[in-house]
């Protein structure tokens, strides 16, 4: 995912507790946070960044319903209209025999649809190059990124606030 062009203040933190404290202070000052990168999930960061709950479960449910409908439509069509056969004294519409295929197609379409929608929404393409503000965010550091052009505060004020709240390193980047 590419970032808009502009100036960025990039702060590195050693531990997630320090990052959470700094996020609270930065938010309290009214500074808008561009993004936070972390090598592992940090509990409580979603609320601080005002990230809304994902609607991906709704997508999974809808694709699951579609898979179930297609499975039943296919099996009913084959067993009653296309090639009706009485097997073992069963009628043309043996509902219990439809359960395994219906379940498998429900799960398959739900998973495939959810993954497809996730890739589309996240703008993940094989040829895309993501913006990596600091390589250490994939290893052991937590990175807080603030876009300076969107702020009321000066660059020096933001850097001072981050330094006072435990940032071990602060970089300035222009994209």
Image (tube, grey):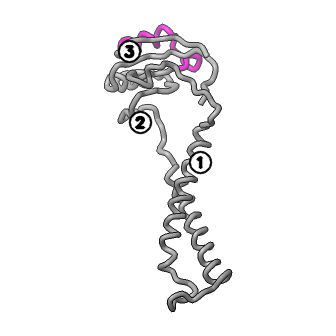
- Pinpoint residue 31: horizontal percent, then vertical percent: 48, 21
Q: Secondary structure at mark 3?
A: loop
N-term-proximal mark, 2 vs 1: 2
Reply yes or no: does residue 156 show up in magenta: yes
**Badge count:** 3
Residue in the image at 34% along x and 24% along y: 21
Which of disc 3 and disc 1 is earlier in sequence? Answer: 1
Q: Nearer the viewer, residue 75 or 68?
A: 75
Most common SS among magenta residues:
helix
Along the line of sight, the residue nearer the viewer: 82 or 147: 82
Distance from the alpha carbon under mark 3 to that under mark 2: 21 Å
Which residue in the protein does label 2 denote? 47
Give the foreground label among 2 and 1: 1
In the image, residue 110 above or below residue 3: below
| Residue, disc 1 | 116
The image quadrant where one finds the N terminus is top right
Write down the region rendered in magenta. 146-164
Looking at the image, do the residues carrying marks 1 and 3 touch, with CB atoms under 8 Å apart?
no
Looking at this view, name the residue that lies furthest to the top: 156
Residue 6, position in %: x, y? Answer: 62, 17
Which residue position holds label 3? Answer: 167
Q: Dot 3: within a 10 Å radius of its alpha carbon, few (fewer than 14), some, or many (20 or more) residues?
A: many
In the image, which disc is placed on residue 73? none
Q: Quadrant of the C terminus?
A: top right
Compare marks 3 and 2 and give the one earlier in the sequence: 2
Name of the residue lying farthest toward the right: 82
- Above or below for 98 versus 172: below
Magenta stretch containing residue 139, yes or no? no
Residue at x-position 56% and y-position 44%: 118
Which of label 3 and label 2 is nearer to you?
A: 3
x, y percent for residue 56: 52, 49
Q: Residues within 10 Å of mark 2 (few under 14, many from 20)?
A: few
């Amino acid at each position: 995912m590419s970032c808009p062009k502009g100036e960025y203040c990039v702060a590195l933190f050693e531990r997630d507790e320090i990052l959470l404290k700094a996020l609270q202070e930065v938010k309290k000052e009214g500074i808008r946070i561009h993004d936070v990168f972390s090598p592992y999930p940090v509990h409580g960061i979603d609320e601080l960044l005002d990230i809304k709950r994902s609607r991906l479960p709704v997508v999974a449910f809808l694709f699951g319903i579609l898979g179930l409908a297609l499975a039943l439509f296919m099996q009913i069509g084959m067993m009653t209209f296309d090639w009706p056969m009485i097997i073992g004294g069963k009628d043309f519409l043996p509902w219990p025999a439809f359960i395994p295929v219906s379940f498998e197609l429900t799960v398959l379409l739900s998973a495939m649809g959810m993954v497809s929608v996730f890739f589309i929404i996240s703008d993940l393409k094989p040829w895309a190059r993501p913006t990596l503000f600091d390589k250490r965010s994939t290893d052991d550091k937590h990175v807080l990124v603030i876009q300076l052009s969107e702020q009321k505060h000066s660059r020096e004020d933001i850097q001072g606030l981050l330094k006072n709240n435990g940032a071990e390193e602060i970089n300035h980047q222009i994209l």
